[in-house]
Amino acid sequence: MPQELIRIETPDDPQISAYRNIRERDLVGRQGRFVAEGKVVLNVLFSTSRFAAESVLLLENRVSGMEDVLERVPADVPVYVASSAVMDAVAGFHMHRGVLAIGMRGRDESAEALIAGLPEHALVVVLSGIANHDNMGAIFRNAAAFGADAVLLDAECCDPLYRKAIRVSVGAALKVPFIRSGSASTLIDALTEQGFDILALSPSGEQEIDRIERAPRTALLLGAEGPGLPAALLARLPSVRIPMRKDFDSLNVAAATAIALHRLWR
């Protein structure tokens, strides 16, 4: 292991204050930090240069079996170990996984800068009003699986670095570049200026997505379940649909994203 494990004996130890009341604090933000949970997610955190870690907190009976992850932890990042009673008291609920880390967000990049840095052949996901953290995490997982180069989120979307969203994404939210800013219309303008063809995915889309010939630079726009994409966006963009039975036209937005990205990736 890169450094000595630091034993935490009481839940009020100031060394682990960043982990206190995880569930409640995630809803209001944590001053430029985020919580990574689970072995797979920590493995991604310490395998990518996108985000730095501030510390690690492990349940004492989870240390064995974490050697491969701990080998990646930089020597200046403290690794704390606690009993189940202490960890549960700190977190505010039962932490059965018992594997946590505090990551640091870093400086936000502008949408224009992120788009400008994309390759000549690029696939981008654009999200409008996705407020469910499970869907957000699943969309990032799909984006990573099917080669999306970036995810652009409007300001109405939920935070992809919320603890549950990161966990559902199995760490993909820490891996796929993203920006959360402004309106979907503004994001579309920025993509258009950089030569992207934008396809709006909707059950009422004009063309079936499996009949689309993907352009070298393509962006897929998706809206929230229920309201879907605003009429103004659908009116200004080519729209596509996923063909399905005529007596059913609705898919979970994460499932729809997977199908559409797979088609565009292939």
Image (cartoon, helix red, strand yellow):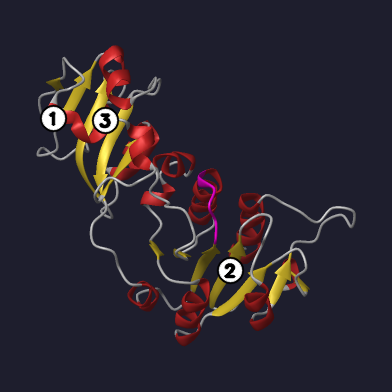
- Callout 1 touching callout 3 (CB < 8 Å): no
What amino acid type should be assigned to the residue bearing mark 1?
Gln
Eye-nearest disc, 2 or 3: 3
Residue 161 in the image: x percent, y percent? Answer: 38, 49
What amino acid type should be assigned to the residue bearing mark 3?
Arg
Q: Along the line of sight, which residue is nearer the eye, 262 or 24?
A: 24
Q: Along the line of sight, which residue is nearer the eye, 241 or 213?
A: 241
Crowding at mark 3 (Cα within 10 Å: few <14, some 14-19, many 20+): some
Crowding at mark 2 (Cα within 10 Å: few <14, some 14-19, many 20+): many
What amino acid type should be assigned to the residue bearing mark 2?
Leu
Q: Which mark is residue 20?
A: 3
Position of 182 relative to 49 (above/below): below
Identify the residue position indicated by label 1 in the image. Answer: 15
Q: Along the line of sight, which residue is nearer the eye, 115 or 182?
A: 182
Which residues lie in the magenta part? 129-133
Residue at image position (64%, 78%) is 232
Position of 258 relative to 35 (above/below): below
Q: CA distance from mark 1 to mark 3?
A: 11 Å
Q: Main secondary structure of the magenta part?
A: loop
Figure quadrant of residue 200: bottom right
Q: Which mark is residue 220?
A: 2
Residue at image position (47%, 78%) is 186
Residue at image position (31%, 30%) is 21
Position of 50 relative to 124 (above/below): above
Crowding at mark 1 (Cα within 10 Å: few <14, some 14-19, many 20+): few
Q: Mark 2 or 3 closer to N-term?
A: 3
Q: Which mark is residue 89?
A: none
